[in-house]
Amino acid sequence: MPRIVPVLPTLTVAVLLTVLCSLGFWQLDRMRQKEAMLARYHANSLAAPAPLPRQIADPQSYAFRAVQLDCAFEGPAHLSPGSSPNGRAGQHVYALCREEGRAARVVVDLGWVPFQADVPLIAGLRARIEGIARPWTEHTFVETLSGSARVSPQTFQSGGEADSPIAPVFVQARTIAPLEGASLPGIQPSPLQVEAIPNNHRSYAIQWFAFATILLIIYGVYLARWRRLQAAGANDTVRRS
């Protein structure tokens, strides 16, 4: 009895379709999660500026909150790739800041400088910072593979037992008002806006569903040709008999 469909290709297509559709629905779920996260960030960004709390139990609850910080910079600044407010490629200047009465030191993203700029000397500068709080995030798999130089708390930890901990959020400066010491010429504060955070998961879902559709079309073409060959073989057997 002739088979209605080829078994192995059909099973293979079924498995691939299951995987592709699962990835598509997973991206739709990620899209809804990202929408909820961005809604929380937007609500946080509407709050009036307030001093950064001494203790932050839930860093995500402070994401994109406007905060104020009076502190003294210590140690060398660190540069990390980043764009300017108008989209120019360059580097962001990160520095460690210690506020009186705070156990943890706070990392501040002072802003953007061109690639050819020297690392600014900021040790000892006291300043009033107003900006937005950003929780630290783990390096992605791609960043780990590429050896990304993105700044993290480990960048500022020397490993000494006397070192105080790093706060679970860093501050992206909007304004920097020196209280003591020189100003910071050439640095352009450029905090990330909530509206600039992409939510591409819908596009990713469409891509996975499109791959599934293309696979179905290819399988349909293959199946039609396979059936024609099956019919031609059956007719030839009849003629030979």
Image (cartoon, rainbow, N blue to C red):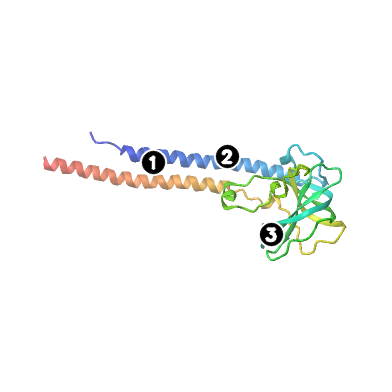
Q: Residue at x 81, y 53 (%)?
A: 73
Q: Position of residue 162 (x, y in %)?
A: 78, 43
Q: Which quadrant: the C terminus?
A: top left
Label 1 residue SS: helix
Badge 3: few (under 14), some or many (20 or more) residues near its Cα, within 10 Å? Answer: many
Q: Position of residue 25 (x, y in %)?
A: 53, 40
| Amino acid at the residue labelled 1 | Val
| Amino acid at the residue labelled 2 | Asp
Residue located beneath label 2 in the image: 29
Residue located beneath label 1 in the image: 13
Q: Relative to residue 209, is residue 95 drawn left or right?
A: right
Q: Earlier in the sequence, mark 3 or mark 2?
A: 2
Badge 2: few (under 14), some or many (20 or more) residues near its Cα, within 10 Å? Answer: some
Q: Answer yes or no: do the residues labelled 1 and 2 have beta carbons within 8 Å?
A: no
User: Which is more toward the observer, 74 or 95?
Assistant: 74
Above/below status of 124 relative to 140: below
**Structural distance between the alpha carbons of marks 1 and 3:** 47 Å
Q: Position of residue 93 (x, y in %)?
A: 73, 57
Q: Relative to residue 149, is residue 220 drawn left or right?
A: left
